[in-house]
Image (cartoon, coloured by chain):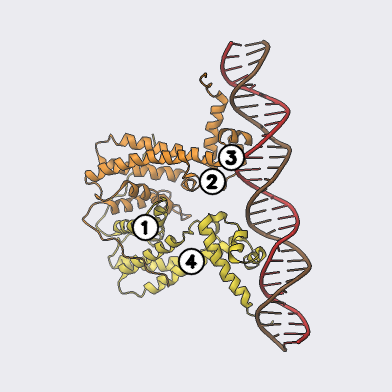
Chain colours: A orange, B yellow, C red, D brown
Amino acid sequence: MPASRPPRADAVRNRRRLLAAAADEFAEYGLDASVADIARRAGVGKGTVFRHFPTKDDLVAAILTDRMDDLHRLGERLLESDDPGAALHEFLTAAAAQRQERDLSFLAEAAGSMPEVAAARARMMDAIDRIVARAAEAGAIRADVTGTDVFLLMCAPNYVAGSVPDAAPDLWCRYLGIILDGLRPEGARPLPAAAPTLP
Amino acid sequence: MPASRPPRADAVRNRRRLLAAAADEFAEYGLDASVADIARRAGVGKGTVFRHFPTKDDLVAAILTDRMDDLHRLGERLLESDDPGAALHEFLTAAAAQRQERDLSFLAEAAGSMPEVAAARARMMDAIDRIVARAAEAGAIRADVTGTDVFLLMCAPNYVAGSVPDAAPDLWCRYLGIILDGLRPEGARPLPAAAPTLP
DNA sequence: CACTAACCGGACCGTTCGGTCAACTTGCTA
DNA sequence: TAGCAAGTTGACCGAACGGTCCGGTTAGTG
C-alpha cells in the first residue's frame, strides 16, 4: 500500500480558515452558531465544512483540542522555570487571558466527552499536575491543593468577570488575585459548614 | 370598570406545574429544552404554555425572577443577624447551594436584559450590597471588596465544580472556602501583573 | 342548574438547522 | 500539458423548533 498523498494546498488553507472562522462565530453566537454562517465567514461553501469535519461536533472538538494543546505546550515550557510559584502564576494568568480573549468554555459541554478532546485534556492536566506539585513543594501554595483544584479554579475569574455586562476588561485580574490569595499556605483553615436551605 | 376576576383554580395550578417542569427541563437539557417537552413534563398541552408565558423567554424570565427573589428574601433576613461575617458566609453558601441543586445560571444569558429580570436582580443586588458593606465594616472581609465582587465570586464555586464530570457533590464547598480565604483582610496584596501571551 | 367567559389541547404553519449529494472545478503528477 | 483524484459547491432533504389558532372543555356565578 502506497503512502497517502499529502493534502492539497487549498485544502489546508481552507481548514485553517474554517477553524478561525468557527472560533469567531462560536465566540459571538455561542454553540448555536450555524454551520452555514461559519462557512460564509470562512468564504467557503457549506459542503466544504462537512468535508473537513464530518459533524458539527467534530469541528467543536478540533477547536477545543487546539486550545488545550496551546496550554499544554505552555505548561511544558514553564516546567523548566526555576521559580515554581511564578510558573504557576504565569500559567493561571495565561489560561485566564486565553479565555478573556475568546471565551469558548461552553464548547466543552458539547464535545467534552469526545475521545480526542479527552486526550487533549489529559495532556493538559498532566502538565498542570506537575506544575502544581512543584509549586506545592516549593511552599508557594498549600500542600493540599491538587492539579484538579487549579484546573477548576483557573476557569473561575473569567466566567465570573463575564457575567456583568459593563465589567472592566481586566476585572478577571482582580479575581485571579483573590483566588490566588486563597491558595496561599497559612496554616489549616476550616471548610465552610453545610449549606442552609432557602426560606 | 369592574375588578378583573381572580384566576381560575386550574390556571394557577398549571402555572405552578409549568414553572417546576420548566426548571427541571432547563436544568437537564439547557436552554435548548423544547417548549413541547416542558409541556409534556407538566402534563399539559403546548398551547397552555404560551397562554401563561407569551414567549419562551418570558418563561425563562419567570424562573429567573423567582430564584433571585428567593435570594433577595434571604438577604433581607440576614441583614438582621448580629454577626455580619457569618451573615455573608451564610448568604454565599445559600447561593452556591441553590446553584448546586439546579444550575440555571445560563438562563441569564437569554433573558438577563428583560425588564422584570433586571428589576429582580436589582433587588437582590441591593441586599448583597448592604450585606457586604456590613461585613466590611465589621472587619470580616477586606474593605475594598464590593457587592459586585461578591455577586460575581459567589457564582464561581459551582461553575467550577460542575466542570468536572466525576467531581464530589460537595466540591463547591471547598472552593467557596478558598475564595472566602482570599477575601479576608490581611493587609494590602499586590494584584497579578499583566497577562503573558501564549507561545 | 344553566350559562359563559376563561381555559385547555394539539393539529398546524413558517422557519431554520445539521447533514447529503451529484455536478462541477482545480491542484498535483507523470 | 493531459488526466485524474481530490476538493468544492449550493440546491436539497427531513427533523425539530417556536409560535398560532380554533373547536371543545370546564370552573365559577347567579
Nearer to the camera, A53 or B62 = A53
Q: Note whether A17 is above or below A197 in the view shown.
A: above
Bin the neighbour count of mark 1 within 10 Å (Cα to Cα): few under 14, some 14-19, many 20 and up: many
**Can residue B112 be seen at all in this image of the molecule?**
no
What label sits on residue A121 in the rendered view? none
* Contact flag, marks 4 and 1 (Cβ < 8 Å): no
Question: Under tag 1, what secondary structure?
Answer: helix
Bin the neighbour count of mark 2 within 10 Å (Cα to Cα): few under 14, some 14-19, many 20 and up: some
Q: Position of residue A37 (x, y in %)?
A: 61, 41
Nearer to the camera, D8 or B139 = D8
Q: Chain of mark 4?
A: B
Q: Are dots 2 and 4 on a single chain?
A: no
Q: Are dots 3 and 2 on a single chain?
A: yes
In the image, what residue type sits under mark 1? Trp
**Is residue B162 left or right of A14 when viewed as pictured?**
left
What label sits on residue A28 in the rendered view? 2
Q: Which residue is mark 4?
A: B67
* Contact flag, marks 2 and 1 (Cβ < 8 Å): no
Bin the neighbour count of mark 3 within 10 Å (Cα to Cα): few under 14, some 14-19, many 20 and up: many
Q: Which residue is mark 3?
A: A38
What label sits on residue B172 in the rendered view? 1
In the image, what residue type sits under mark 2? Glu
Question: Under tag 3, what secondary structure?
Answer: helix
Q: Residue at x 36, y 47 (%)?
A: A151
Q: Are dots 2 and 1 on a single chain?
A: no
